[in-house]
Structure formats: structure tokens, C-alpha cells
Amino acid sequence: MLRKAPPLESVEVFVAAARGGSFRAVARDMALSPSAVSRRIAGLEEFLGVILFDRSGLVPVLSAAGLRYLERVEPGLRTITDATDDMAAPRSGRLRVAASHSFASIWLLPRLATLLEETGVDVELVVGAGFDALASNEADIGIWGGRVAPSGLKAVPLFEVTAVPVAPERLANGRAPPRPGESLGDFPLVSVHRPKDLWQRWLGIAPRQVRSFDTLHMMYEASAAGLGVALATPLLSEPFLASGRLRICSSEPRPLGLSYDLFHPSARSRRGVEGVFMDWMTGQVAQSMARFEGLR
């Protein structure tokens, strides 16, 4: 009996190569040798009777036939992957999450024990990493603010960033913090190096002088120590506001034109452990946003 479909592993390698840019990169990501990748693609081309890649240049590129085949088989491969996840993926397990130091230490880390107890998902934090952590499989999911998803990654919005000025009960020089509606023009301001224009986004003009710190966590600690007025954003400012170390100086929240997003490879869907974590994150973020609104 003649086989009517090619081996699934050959189709998987083809799709990865079509999206990955080079056979060597695909080999590394799929734990195969470059020659094994080439053999599987060559076997698929022989099965189909068409050339899928133009190999005349330094890097193989999809032929017209390869592009047509990719458009037909990629959705089918995704359907198979999703169906397998639904049937076989555990609803609990270990998940590697990349995040900034401030988001991880201030907001996510204190909730991980509850996450494990409620869902069985055990999170390993990859702190300070960027998109490369997802590309190299060092992390399964990334959570960052103010970033745009590169090709191959999907962004799931968590919340839009608004901000209000905050300060301690007294500044270091003994001065009272600004009152609602009072100009911030002659008050010391603190911010972060990245993004460097937080106060300009909030004020609409560049402030005369701002003392900046490496992380949002350091910025809030500096403000709580009396070094200046900071901008409180949802989630990250939550423990400082809840404890009273920082107090809101204005009732007027303003959008900063930034968002926090959860990033994951676009080939994956909300299944298994990742889906459980995403659903949990959505609920936790909604609770923190409500608390932030209630403090104003």
C-alpha cells in the first residue's frame, strides 16, 4: 500500500526551516545535526516531487512550491500539535518565565507559592533575560513592558500602563510632598534609565532634571527614601502604596503609551501548563488593577 502522507517529523522540520532562516539554526533548536535536517527535507522533496528550497545562495530560501506547501501544511501541523496538547499535556508542571528584575521581584515572585498551591504550576524565573531567552528555549514565556514582539513571537496584552505621581510623607529635605493639582516644577523627580522618558510621557514636556536608577524597584525605593517624586504604575507600585511607604500625590492618572505583555512563540497556543499560567496571570492582573484604581 502506497503511503499517502509524508513522515510527520519531515513536515515538522520543513516548517521549522521555512520559519527559522537556516538549516543550522533549525538543527540547533530541534536537537538534530544539520545533515539530519537536510536529509529530512530532501526526503520530503523526493516524496512530493518538487523542490521546496532554493539552495543556490548562502542560506536556503523557500521556492514558490515551498511557499505554497507551507501555507497548506502549517495550519494542519498546528492542529495536530494543539490536539496532542489537549490530550497529553499535563495541567501542572514546571514553567520557565523570563521577566525583568523589578516585575519578577516586586509582583510575580510573592505570588508563586499561591500559583503552585492553586494550579500545580511551578515557575522557574529567568530574571533579566530578553527575547533571546525565548528564541533559545531558555524560557517558555516572557513578561515585559514597553516592548514589541519580534517575528515568531506572539504578544498577549496584560495591561496598559497609566501612572500617578507618588512620594513619601516627607521628602529628604523635610519638605511636604506635592498636593493634588500642585505643580511638580520645583520638586525633585526620580525615574529609570529605561524607558528614559517616563516623566516626559506623563508631563508632556521634558522635565528640567530627573535622577534616574537602573530598575523600577530601585526608583520606588529611592522615592520612599525621600529622594524625589516617582511615577506609580499598576502592579509594580502595589506593595509600596499598600504599605504607605509611598502616597499618591495626584488623583489624575495619565496613560504613558506603554503596555505590559506576555510573550510566547506564535506557533504555540494556550494549552497545558502555559495555558494554565496565562489564565492565572489574567486573573491576578485584574485584581491588582482593581486595587490600584481603589487606592486613588
Image (cartoon, helix red, strand yellow):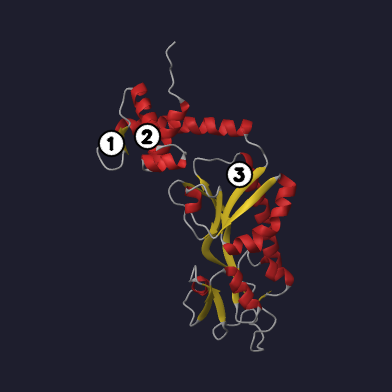
Question: Badge 3: how crowded within 10 Å, few (<14), some, or many (20+)?
Answer: many
Question: Badge 1: how crowded within 10 Å, few (<14), some, or many (20+)?
Answer: few
Task: Name the secondary structure under disc 1.
Answer: loop
What residue is shown with label 3? 274
Q: Nearer the viewer, residue 296 or 288?
A: 288
Instruction: Examine the rendering and report whether any part of residue 215 can be seen.
Output: yes
Question: Eyeballing the image, is 270 above or below 79?
Answer: below
- Three-letter amino acid code of the residue under disc 1: Arg
User: What separation in Å lies between label 1 and label 3 (alpha carbons)?
Assistant: 37 Å
- Indicate the position of residue 157 as horizontal and vertical percent values: 56, 53
Say whether disc 1 or disc 3 marks the residue closer to the N-terminus. 1
Say whether disc 2 or disc 1 marks the residue closer to the N-terminus. 2
- Indicate the position of residue 179 as horizontal and vertical percent values: 65, 81
User: What separation in Å lies between label 2 and label 1 (alpha carbons)?
Assistant: 14 Å
Question: Eyeballing the image, is 75 above or below 25?
Answer: above
Task: Name the secondary structure under disc 3.
Answer: helix
